[in-house]
Image (cartoon, rainbow, N blue to C red):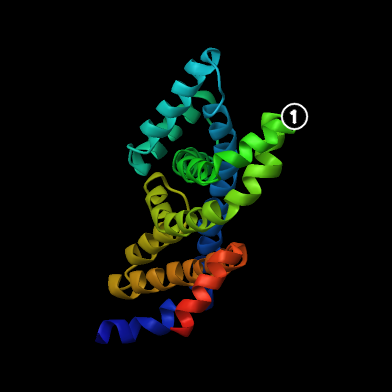
Amino acid sequence: MDRILEQAPRFFAWSNLRLLAEAAGVTLGMTLVGCLIGFGLAFLLVFLRQTPGLWAAPLRLLCIAYVETFRRIPFLVVTYLVLFFIQALVSDASLFTVAVTAICIYAIAYTAEIIRGGLESVPRQQVEAAQAMNMGRLETNLLVVLPQAWPVIVPPAVAFAVSFIKDTALVSQIGVFELTFRGKELNNQGYSGLLVFSTIAFCYFLISYPLSRFGQHLEKRLETPRGQRRARRLRVV
């Protein structure tokens, strides 16, 4: 404890705080970029996976294989695979690009199942009614299915992104200058590990908590009127 009290004024100097703030920005940036791109591509994967017809069977099997494979491979292994694959093609690729690509690949596999569950939660009668009105498959998904599926899709998708912020610490293993990597650097400079990583943990909390609250806000905004009435009855009881 005496060591922590002695080092605290030097540790919380402006230069170190700026270093941690930049690392927090890298952590948040690569998580949001990777998850948002992955979320968008997951919609495409689900759309292809739900393509009807015998001719599309290989395509459906390929989409299923992608999801099942990357949901069962640790994120750190995916990161190394992406690193070595990209370096084989582009020798000077940035580590940030490698990390974002790995996050994107991982996010596609996980959010695709969230999206598929949300789309399939919409009653089949809605789709049949759209087909009876001569609406195409893409038009039906965009105008009929997706608006009703958002309340099911958004909350777990946001929860995945928030929880994945913690997993980005693994990309420190390839040298990305995010929070955990900077924490290791400061610890190697002689600062107490307890002081350093307590601060790093607090930084992760500062990043994650507002996003969690934002997810809860979206969940309430997207809640169906029936669900809102049920929630009000529960509060009254």
Q: Residue furthest left?
A: 1
- Closer-to-camera residue (13/197): 197
Q: Residue furthest top?
A: 55
Q: Residue at x 62, y 42 (%)?
A: 126
Q: Residue at x 38, y 82 (%)?
A: 8
Let me know if residue 90 appears in the view. Answer: no
Q: Residue furthest right?
A: 134
Vertical comparison of 134 with 79: above or below: above
Percent x, y for residue 180?
A: 39, 59
Percent x, y for residue 53?
A: 55, 17
Q: Which residue is mark 1?
A: 134
Considering the numbered disc 1 on the image, is that residue within a helix, a strand or a loop?
loop
Percent x, y for residue 140?
A: 68, 36
- Closer-to-camera residue (88/139): 139
Circle 1: residue type = Asn
Position of 63 with respect to 40 (left or right) is left
Let me know if residue 225 appears in the view. Answer: yes
Vertical comparison of 89 with 108: above or below: above
Q: Residue at x 48, y 46 (%)?
A: 114
- Closer-to-camera residue (153/34): 153
Percent x, y for residue 209?
A: 48, 71
Quarter of the image holding residue 191? bottom left
Position of 72 with respect to 14 (left or right) is left
Quarter of the image holding residue 4? bottom left
Position of 160 with respect to 93 (left or right) is left
Position of 32 with respect to 186 (left or right) is right
